[in-house]
Image: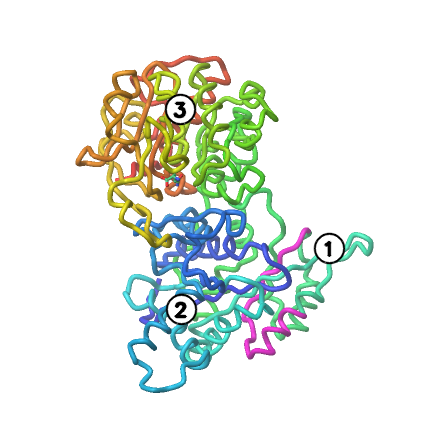
Amino acid sequence: MSRKKRVKHIFVTGGVVSSLGKGILSASLGALLKSRGLRVAIQKYDPYINVDPGTMSPYQHGEVYVTDDGAETDLDLGHYERFLDEATSQACNMTMGKIYQTVLENERRGEYLGGTVQVVPHVIDEIKSKMLELSKNGSYDVIITEIGGTVGDIESLPFLEAMRQLKLQYGSKNLVNIHLTLVPFIRSASELKTKPTQHSVKMLLEIGIQPDVLVCRSEKTLSKDIKHKIGLFCNLSDSDVVGLCDAETIYEVPQILHKEKLDSLVLKKFGLKSSKSADLTDWITLTDKIKYPKDGIVKIAVCGKYAEYPDAYKSIVEAFVHAGAANNVKVEISWLHSEDLENGVITAEKAMDGASGLLVAPGFGERGIEGKIEIVKYVRENNIPFFGICLGMQCATIEYARNVCNMDMANSTEFTKKTKYPVIDMMEHQKRIKLKGGTMRLGNYPCIIQEGTISYHAYQKNLINERHRHRFELNNAYRDQLIENGLEVVGTSPDGVLVEIIELKNHRWFVGVQFHPELKSRVHKPHPLFNSFIAEAKNYRDGISVTHDQPLFDNQMIKVDNQS
Ligand code: GLN
């Protein structure tokens, strides 16, 4: 790759409707450019006024993705990390709220020297300066910036204006706008319709932006004629119109875009020559494994309070796809509403019927907790593989305290202050915190794992680093009592103070983790704990029992990153 000094920028915008997959497009293009030898970073600009999504309900926003450095971010950053295998950071997710916060702080410091502070130029200038931040550290050749929202929304206008000004300043050789639109198939006419795309390009033109490339989502492959028509009415040559027809799995998108020559098109626009062609062998193998699982289906029950809204558990869903492929199975999730268990709509036995494992999901608040505790009891007593993540681990601890250690009505102080046995309690340093936003124990922290445990065999090492997002923790006042009754504390912070992993010895696979392993599962490096859990669920499905003195999953088979 001949490296030009100047960093190249790709801005991905969306038109017609939301949810067309700008995040997947950005992540896939990033993966393609990386495989062609470029150093790529991706950032997301969200138009809402919240400073970050950390305080938003999952119903509003889906999962909050946490970075190594503890930023609470948009779930698209999860796609970027999974597809690119590059860690994102605080700098990779900007919101309009953060921009305004900075502008207002500057104003209070008197930095605008008596001027009237306005959207143009002050807010736009702040956006531009933030958009360029990642390009300054010399680590990247290409920065992909995804603009949230749909062209035509009032709130994303300042981001688009900032992009327009940067495009003018940098020129088309250095800044390319890829606009993602929809070309709907109208069944009654049996035709693909280009008008919505034309309209959304017109909207961009109205604000002074001529897109350089159009990526058109459609149910059917775009014919040459359709591409020509779109190009003609949107001021583009036919080759600048790229088709992206619906895929069976999101992991097929890099291949589709490569077939459509998007990576070469972008390189050509930048005047870059790549000596390296994209090697998609790993992607092809992965998608084959996802589409045609050799060893059938493994059903996993996932219990959470947002069960009807899987976007709230995006990284868990994807981690199962990765670990399923690594184990040659398709993981079929059966979503369980914790409240349904609590309200007697379904029994734990019925809920686990046909499932080979249970995952109790992370979460906040009291709603559905008793249902989670009930189903943990069922899988513990019936020796069914169990994986508890964050709140899931806390529920497992409460269940064990109540039903094995005879601590009647043991609970977490998150749900009641009245309990006699607060086995889960707020971490000491959290008790002094008043502000809600960005104040949890967030990001990467080390954990030491005891040898000979399920977790050790999964990671095959003692020292791991995992990401966190919590305020509560296993209460050390009860640690000894829990251990005396058979609960194993197999992972702690290096100083031994915070409990990070619990297991049960006389159970085939019972692991609760205070951290969020799902955030580190990558497309070609499934997470060791998910691999091990699915391997054991598969054994359970097949009626195979194994001892836990060796790894359940052979990490050598794939490029597992042992979370150093
Ligand atoms: N609500 C719990 C806590 O704050 C668990 C958080 C989570 O599951 N991410 O500790």
Which amino acid is tagged 3? Met
* Residue with the most extreme bottom position: 114
Tell whether 174 sits left or right of 215.
left
> Residue 109, how many percent across, how many down?
29, 76
Residue at 39% over, 55% down: 34
Of labels 1 and 2, earlier in sequence is: 2
Vertical placement of residue 107 versus 450, above or below: below
The residue at 47%/18% (across/down) is: 378
Q: Callout 2: 10 Å neighbours few (<14), some, many (20+)?
A: many
Residue under label 3, please give it: 409
How many angstroms separate mark 2 from mark 3 (CA)?
Answer: 46 Å
User: How far is disc 1 from disc 2 in space, using C-alphas?
Assistant: 39 Å
Residue 99 image label: 2
- Looking at the picture, does residue 521 appear above or below residue 346? below
Label 3 to label 1: alpha-carbon separation: 57 Å
Residue range in magenta is 199-219
The residue closer to the viewer here, 372 or 18, is: 372
Near-viewer residue (205 or 29): 205
Which mark is in front, 1 or 2? 2
